[in-house]
Every structure is written in C-alpha cells, then in structure tokens.
Image: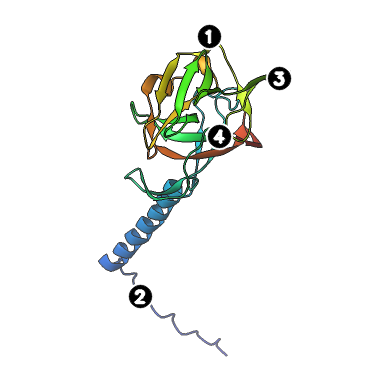
Amino acid sequence: MSAPVSPPAPPRKPSRPRGPLRIFKDILSIGAAASIALVARTSLADHYVVPSGSMEPTVEVGDRILVDKLAFGVRLPIVDRYLVDLAAPRPGDVVVLGSPENGITLLKRVVAGPGDVVTVRGGHVDLNGTAVRVAETVSGDLEYLGATPHALRIGDGGGPDFGPVRVPADHYLVMGDNRGNSHDGRSFGFVTRDSIRGRAVRVFLRNGAPTWRPL
C-alpha cells in the first residue's frame, strides 16, 4: 500500500516593493521622532560636558552636567529664543549659554542681573554698593552670592577688573568661579536673556563614575 501523498504547498506570493506611500510614512515617522528629540533637548533637559577649568572648583574638566532647559522658560527650537518666560535667572545661578563672541556653549555663573550696579575688583564682586561676602574655610573660599554659598577660586590676581556699571534691561553679567582663569563677561560684556539656555543643576558623571552633585 503506497503512502499518502501530501498536496503541493501553494506558491508564495512574490513580495511587492514598498510603494511611495509606505516610504513616505516611514520618512514621516522618522521625522516626527527626530522632531520630538529636538524639542526635548531644546525645551526640557539636556547634558553638557565641561571643556575647561573656568568653573573650578565647582565643576571639573570633563564633568557631565545635567541642564534644566525649563528653568527660565520654554524655548523655540532652532530659533534660540524664549517663547514663554517662566522665571528670570538670578545671581548665583549656574547657567549654560551661547557665547556672544562665537556662539560656543559656555558654563558660567550669573553674577548680576538687570538694573544691578556691579563692580569686580581682584575677582571679588560688589553688588549695588555692597561687597558680596567671601568666607575663608579649611577647604577653600566660599562666596555668598545668591541663596547658597559656592566654592570660589581666586588666583592670578582674580582676573580683569570690571565696572562699576549698571546692567542693562534684559541682560546679565556672567563669570567663572575660577576668577583668575575665566574668559567671561568681564571680557565679552553682558549677555542677553535669550542667550541663556538653561540652569545647570547637577554633575551626574565625574572621571567616568556616576555622581549626583548639586550646583
């Protein structure tokens, strides 16, 4: 008795090349994902790698910094300006900004805001006729600028002197914490509010090791 013979398998339908509509949908999906990522980095949060020692000892070269892009408002992608203002930068804030000289991203501290009369002598700041307090501690100097004191390094004479001058409306003076080794507002002048892209809030990586240091 012969074994039953299985019916031949139906022929496979040849795969049809993707049509223009499917390709368009794929491109649209990729574009939407890229747009969401761009908006998130522009308007919500971002990270920054510290390239120089101008903010030592607060941050070190190579530190990775978490930046809150919503700290001061909602920014428009590409245009590099605020669509909605939420809060104003304040003296003591560590901020990421675009250099007025060449657009390179910088990390600096806000020292004075609109209407303030600011003077810098030997790296020490005077605001509106009052010297900003600097205290000597075992671990180094602390500057009492803003709500929380921060580490300060005065070396090489403290860098160039500045002022006295009144900060114009919608402008800020920014400086590095390493006053004798910082190319900052004492050299390139005041920066606009729109050039400030967010507040640096934490160091999350140092020397390749995770950390969570407040700024």
Mark 3 vs 2, N-terminal side: 2
Q: Residue 47 appears at what percent x and percent y?
A: 51, 40
Residue under pointer 2: 13
Q: Is residue 165 left or right of residue 131?
A: left
- Which of label 2 and label 4 is nearer to you? 4
Work out how far the residue at label 4 is from the one at label 1, CA to CA, in angstroms.
Answer: 27 Å
| Residue plotted at (50% across, 85% down) | 5
Mark 4 vs 1, N-terminal side: 4
What kind of residue is marked 3? Ser
Work out how far the residue at label 2 is from the one at label 1, CA to CA, in angstroms.
Answer: 78 Å
Residue under pointer 1: 156
Mark 2 vs 1, N-terminal side: 2
| Residue plotted at (48% across, 46% down) | 87
Disc 4 vs disc 1: Cβ atoms closer than 8 Å? no
Is the residue marked by circle 2 packed among few (<14), some (14-19), or many (20+) residues within 10 Å? few
- In the picture, residue 177 is in which quadrant? top right
Mark 2 vs 4, N-terminal side: 2
What kind of residue is marked 2? Lys
Q: Is residue 54 visible?
A: no
Work out how far the residue at label 2 is from the one at label 4, CA to CA, in angstroms.
Answer: 54 Å
* Quadrant of the rendering where the C terminus is positioned: top right
- Which of label 4 and label 1 is nearer to you? 1
| Residue plotted at (63% across, 37% down) | 214
